[in-house]
């Protein structure tokens, strides 16, 4: 991952962005919708992976070894399956569908993610990152598990508020910039004009089925960036479907991304890589994961040590 530039909203837009494919941990294929060359940010949302649906009944399932973060929050949301979270704060927490894990790295944290034993056969979900503002990104790390989230119904759609406020419901997830994240789910044909905050920029990603967003027919694997300045969004589906809708005030602090780090300068990101590889104390240690910690790749701009 490279530089994340400030958002250029330019009012309402219809920008289709094909997700790239990548590998998560020990072999799970994922679709990466953010960041891409076309779009680096949606509000403070700076990363969005859609993983699965996958059959993890054989092998060892999901396994992402201990790795670090700075300058961000991770948001984990499952449609199917179960993931066991461990972190350097001592947290040991399973997450299941309908629950939310929110980890705030602050100045530094490390964690691992794995399929528990025994485990469900299916795995399907999403992981997001939120770039922390300058006022919070050097603070203490934290972890929160929310077993229940607020829900509302809106003209045929069941809406779960993952972060922020929507339809009069507020998520318990503690965030540090104005933003919103929602799952919209229909069990049959439905249509609506969904209310939006015109001060936010938005993007939509279908996880299951097909949803027509304004006049764009969306399937899994494509992010639709919608820009800013909308007070409603036309949605229609002809059968069961699940969609994510994220938004927020455009972020103008120009965060940079490299590997698992969000910073502000190349020097900061390079130092974070070197610190992790040197087992710097501020990242802590993940206890109980039966595998190797990941190695941070140095960014291409990094000077060799000693030059």
Image: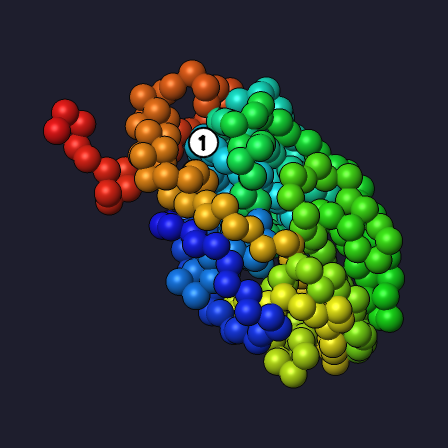
Q: From the viewer's side, name the closer residue of 77 and 281.
A: 281
- Residue 172 at x, y percent in the picture: 77, 39
Among the 4 quarters of the image, the one containing residue 52 = bottom right
The residue sitting at 73% across, 72% down in the picture is 233
The number of callouts visible is 1
**Horizontal arrangement in the rendering, residue 116 relative to residue 164 (left or right):** left
Which color scheme does this rendered protein use? rainbow
Give above or below for 270 relative to 188. Answer: above
**Horizontal arrangement in the rendering, residue 266 relative to residue 151 (left or right):** left
Q: Is residue 138 visible?
A: yes
Q: Is residue 224 visible?
A: no
Name the quarter where the C terminus is drawn: top left
Residue at the spot of label 1: 68
**Horizontal arrangement in the rendering, residue 35 relative to residue 11 (left or right):** left
- Residue 73 at x, y percent in the picture: 58, 39
The residue furthest bottom is 215
The residue sitting at 45% across, 31% down in the picture is 68
Q: From the viewer's side, name the closer residue of 182 and 190.
A: 182
Among the 4 quarters of the image, the one containing residue 232 = bottom right
The residue furthest top is 281
Element at label 1: strand
Give above or below for 211 relative to 44. Answer: below
Give above or below for 284 relative to 146. Answer: above
The residue sitting at 79% across, 55% down in the picture is 166
């Amino acid at each position: 991952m490279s530089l994340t530039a400030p958002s250029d909203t330019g009012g309402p837009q219809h920008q289709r962005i094909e997700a790239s494919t990548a590998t998560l941990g020990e072999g799970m294929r994922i679709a990466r919708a953010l960041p891409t060359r076309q779009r680096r940010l949606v509000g403070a949302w700076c990363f969005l992976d859609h993983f699965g649906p996958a059959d993890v009944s054989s092998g060892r399932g999901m396994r992402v070894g201990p790795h670090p973060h700075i300058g961000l929050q991770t948001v984990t949301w499952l449609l199917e399956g179960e993931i066991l979270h461990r972190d350097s704060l001592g947290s040991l927490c399973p997450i299941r569908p309908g629950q939310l894990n929110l980890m705030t790295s602050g100045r530094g944290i490390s964690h691992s993610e794995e399929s528990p034993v025994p485990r469900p056969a299916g795995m399907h979900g999403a992981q997001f990152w939120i770039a922390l503002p300058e006022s919070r990104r050097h603070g203490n790390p934290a972890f929160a598990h929310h077993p229940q989230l607020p829900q509302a119904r809106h003209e045929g759609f069941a809406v779960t508020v993952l972060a922020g406020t929507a339809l009069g419901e507020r998520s318990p997830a503690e965030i540090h910039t104005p933003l919103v994240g929602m799952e919209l789910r229909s069990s049959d044909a439905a249509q609506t004009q969904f209310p939006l905050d015109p001060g936010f920029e938005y993007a939509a990603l279908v996880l299951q089925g097909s949803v027509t967003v304004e006049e764009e027919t969306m399937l899994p694997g494509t992010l639709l960036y919608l820009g800013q300045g909308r007070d409603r969004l036309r949605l229609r589906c002809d059968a069961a479907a699940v969609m994510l809708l994220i938004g927020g005030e455009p972020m103008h602090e120009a965060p940079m991304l490299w590997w698992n780090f969000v910073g502000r300068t190349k020097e900061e990101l390079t130092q974070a890589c070197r610190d992790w590889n040197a087992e710097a104390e501020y990242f802590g240690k993940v206890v109980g994961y039966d595998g190797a910690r990941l190695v941070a790749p140095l960014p291409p701009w990094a000077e060799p040590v000693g030059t």
